[in-house]
Amino acid sequence: QVQLVESGGGSVQAGGSLRLSCAASRYTSSSYSMGWFRQAPGKDREGVAAIDDDGSTCYADSVKGRFTISQDNGKKSAYLQMNSLKPEDTAMYYCAADAARRLRKPLNRYEYNYWGQGTQVTVSS
């Protein structure tokens, strides 16, 4: 069973930056796609950014130009660099993974089989 552990969340003022990390373990496949999702109170979980096994990335329109997803060469970790943070970015952020080289809808939560417990990001105005 793949395990994902997020870290790096916290509180920051608007305009600030945070870097989230997702440490993965117990991989059983040689290929993985990974994504970052977020969920604010009372709202659905939404896809923020995703990266496939070939390193191709995609982003939600709301974070394009501000957030950057990356992964290490061994694909054991994924990162989300968040710049120019806004109060509306406040949410619980989750890391997700799936043993697929490429996902058809990488920002769709139902494409992923493995999830972390989440890390809270709070942006104050």
Image (cartoon, helix red, strand yellow):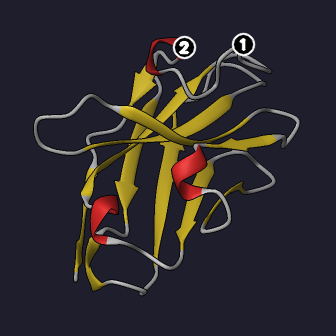
Count of numbered badges drawn on the protein: 2
Check the picture and name the quadrant holding the C terminus: bottom left
Is residue 65 in view?
Answer: yes
Q: Residue at x 68, y 65 (%)?
A: 65
Name which residue type carries label 2: Glu
Who comes first in sequence, dot 1 or dot 2?
1
Q: Which x, y percent locates residue 105?
A: 65, 17
Q: Which x, y percent locates residue 117?
A: 26, 40
Is residue 1 in view?
Answer: no
Q: Residue at x 57, y 28 (%)?
A: 107
Q: Is residue 33 left or right of residue 41?
A: right
Q: Residue furthest left?
A: 42
Q: Characterize the local packing of mark 2: few (<14), some (14-19) or many (20 or more) Cα atoms within 10 angstroms.
A: some
Q: Is residue 89 left or right of residue 79?
A: left
In the displayed structure, 2 sits above or below 75; it is above
Q: Is residue 114 left or right of residue 64?
A: left
Name which residue type carries label 1: Arg
117, 65: nearer the viewer: 65
Circle 1 sits on which residue? 104
Q: Quadrant of residue 67?
A: bottom right
Q: Which x, y percent locates residue 88?
A: 30, 61
